[in-house]
Image (cartoon, rainbow, N blue to C red):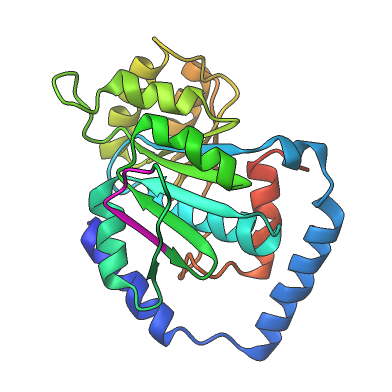
Amino acid sequence: MKRRILSNIKSLRCSGNVSGEKVLHVKKESRRIYKEYRTSAKLTSIKLIGVAGLCSGAGTTQMCIMLAVFMGKVLKKKTAVAGDEVTYSLMLRQMQKAAAIQHKGIASRHAYSMDGIDYYCGIRDEDIGILRQKYDVIILDISFENTFDNTNVTFARMVSRLSACDEKILAGSMLPWKSRECEKKMERIERFLDIRGLKMVTLAACDKEAVSIIKKHGVEVVLIPFERNPFVISGENLRSFLELLKIT
């Protein structure tokens, strides 16, 4: 699934055509948002954003990319994304504009920069503190999809990463065959972390499942802003990221 999505991203970046009128609209809206919120105390307080994927196909990596583009391109923050080695090293191979980067003290087998955003693959927990000294905002792509207690990357460690974030976002699915898996992951997370009041982004919403999760866990379910190409955010979706990060 991830391999297909990332392959599609490559073709989108190479062939996606955007009309001049739409580009102008995006630029104008971006400038308005930057001028309005660049000195926001809430925005200044956000240094670490965690997006926790509760199941496969939840759009976690897509959300991380869009958040990075929003923070880096629109709000002019020096931004980095840190995620698992498989996904982000595959993305490196798929992209044409990526350039390798070096950072002293960071043990990342693959680190690269693309369109002003830096990406780190498979970093250690202690590396996050080093990155915080270099970047205005770091976005953590946290996957609970394949975390088991008998592996090196334990469920508790992923929860620990999420709990350290200034803004915490869950990514799940409300599809009938996926929602129960997400609920089970949330129940485990609650053993370590209070998730009441958090937002869960989802690609599709089914009212019954969404209401069930909200009632049980106090989580607000919101649809992921749809973008055919996550590296380019359309003007109508820009302000939805302000709401997602509770900046408005």
Q: Residue furthest top?
A: 191
- Magenta region: which residues? 106-112
Residue 16, how many percent across, how many down? 46, 83
Q: Is residue 216 magenta?
A: no
Looking at the image, which residue is at 37% across and 41% down? 173
Residue farthest to the left?
150
Q: Is residue 170 visible?
A: no
Q: How many marks?
A: 0
Front-lying residue, 90 or 223: 90
Residue drawn where x is 67% and y is 60% of the image: 238
* Residue placed most toward the observer, 153 or 213: 153
Is residue 133 among the parts visible in the rendering?
yes
Q: At x 62% / y 38%, what residue is drawn?
A: 47
Seen in the image, is 110 located left or right of residue 171?
left
User: Is 25 displayed left or right of 97 in the figure?
Assistant: right
* Quadrant assignment, res 78: bottom right
Residue 234 in the image: x percent, y percent?
62, 69
Would you place residue 15 above or below residue 201 in this image? below
Q: Quadrant of the N terminus?
A: bottom left
Q: Is residue 55 left or right of residue 139?
A: left
| Magenta highlight on residue 108 | yes
Residue 214 position in % (x across, y down):
52, 24
Q: Residue at x 42, y 78 (%)?
A: 13
Which quadrant does the C terminus fall into? top right
In the displayed structure, would residue 159 be above or below residue 134?
Answer: above
Q: Residue furthest front?
A: 104
Residue 135 position, x and y percent, is 58, 48
**22 vs 121, nearest the viewer:** 121
Q: Quadrant of residue 43?
A: top right
